[in-house]
Amino acid sequence: MGANHTPPQGEGHLQQRLSLVTMMAITWIALAGTIGFVLPSGGSISLVYGFLFCVLCNLALTASLGELAALWPTAGGQYHFVFALCTERWKRVMSFWVGWTNIGGWLTIVTAQGFFGAQFVSAAAVVASNGTFELRQWTTYLIFLAILTFATAVNIWGNRMLGRWNDAALYWSLLGVVIISIVLLSMSDKTEPSFVFANFQNATGWPDGVSWLLGLTQSALSLIGFDVVMHMAEEMPNPSTDVPRAMIYSIIIGGTSGIAFILVMLFCFVDPATVLGTSTGMPIVELILQATNSRAAATILALMLTICFINGTIGSVASASRLVYAMARDEGLPRHSFFSHIDPKLNVPIRTIVLCYLFNVAFGLLYLGPSVAFNAYTAACTIFLNISYSFPIIVLLVRGRDVLKQHQSVGVPFKLGKWGYFLNWTAALYVVIISIFYCFPPGFPVSPNTMNYVSAVLGIFFTFVAIYWFMYGNTFKGPTFDIIIAEHLHVGTSTGTCSADQRKQEV
């Protein structure tokens, strides 16, 4: 391995323009879109205490993955960890499956983020028109296409400003939670503290324990996606240090802003029937409208939330495209030599960005069909990501944490030490349990219209992956860590951003 490695003729390289602050994700905005799903499944008890429980478990999860990211800071993230940790016999097949599962998760997250943004635009239109604008599936899809197109354009032509854009998105998100919280608290009528901290309701038909766990899944949904930083690691000058910190800080800041926003919403939740049955389709928009009694204020704040989801879509496209690029580089993608190309002028993987765009244009059409099909498709993103989170940790537990010792030199900046097994087991159990309950129908008894078809989505997806593996899996070679790290060192040296954190790692 050597620092003189350079890209092939006609190839660009990923630029190290991203920082710790740039890659910190804020998750409170997802809570604004999911409150209507949580309250029937455990009420405020599920929302408040369930969210706190999920934050603690996600800290264990990010710490566990952060320890591995400190050793192997590459765009492949989880599937590269599995490749490094598995025995020679299993590393190719296991990492291939984890990689494709992670890709499935990020491609569907792009859809979910984009449609959340589109739904908030539609909600703003309903409020601004005083109800004369009708929510239609095709108009929401067209708004989604506009958001997706904008996010794709920013990723292709705005790469130079992507770091500053992400910085602005972080501050915009924090500003949003502050402004909306102040507006609601100062203008809305208030509920009793007993409703906020001690109200339990079960409208699902499931036993109370199952109902609470189903509510927990929505809190877990608001915290996923922190692995975006791992897939952008090759564009950070200090990834071994900053990737673990960015993931953990994201959960801390997202958890803090999230619980604050939850308390604000619950204290202002004076008319649940109207809020949950709103014609806008977005309960938080109706909550703001009730508090302010101003269509202009509700419209502006709804559009403020829209911008948060547009920023999220931009980040999701970036993450998905880098992950697909990594899989193509490792020859695990059809026409891998075509998709592993970095544009020499723009220094971004344009072909995988466009592939992500086309995938979402096509699968976004599910929104025009039965709602159960689209809901199953978007819900699958959480299970896909959870599987990719859990696999490297489970492999580590199966093989024993001593397997890390051969890779952890004195200079490795992030180690779990004596807390390793406790944090690893907590993370693994949490992800497995949450993933199981994601497959449950939201209510009981079950009808064809209320059935949760996410298991069918998973079955179809894994069938296609299995077919590809048995037909072309022999081409997948897995990551070549020494070349990836040498390229990272070369880019850092040539751009003047190389630091002590960029070192050769023996894998």
Image (tube, rainbow, N blue to C red):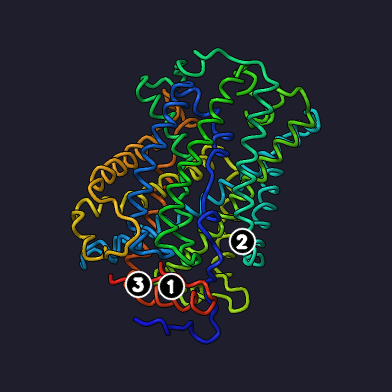
**Left/right of residue 257 with respect to residue 394 in the rendered view:** right
**Left/right of residue 251 with respect to residue 344 in the rendered view:** left
Labelled disc at residue 441: none
Residue 443, position as x, y percentages in the image: 44, 25
Residue that numbered label 2 is attached to = 162
Residue 334, position as x, y percentages in the image: 45, 70
The residue positioned 42% from the left and 20% from the top of the image is: 205
Task: Specify whether residue 398 is in view.
Answer: yes
Q: Nearer the viewer, residue 505 or 116?
A: 505
**Label 2 element class:** helix
Q: CA distance from mark 3 to mark 2?
A: 26 Å
Residue that numbered label 1 is attached to = 329
* Mark 3 or mark 2: whose residue is earlier in sequence: 2
Residue 91, position as x, y percentages in the image: 26, 65
* Mark 1 or mark 3: whose residue is earlier in sequence: 1
**Left/right of residue 230 with respect to residue 33 in the rendered view:** left
Q: Quadrant of residue 70?
A: bottom left
* Mark 2 or mark 1: whose residue is earlier in sequence: 2
Q: CA distance from mark 2 to mark 1?
A: 23 Å
Q: Nearer the viewer, residue 318 or 92?
A: 318
Which amino acid type is marked by label 1? Answer: Arg
Category of crowding for the residue at label 1, using alpha-carbon neighbours closer than 10 angstroms: few (below 14), some (14–19), many (at least 20): many
Q: Is residue 392 above or below residue 442?
A: below
**Label 1 element class:** helix
Labelled disc at residue 481: 3
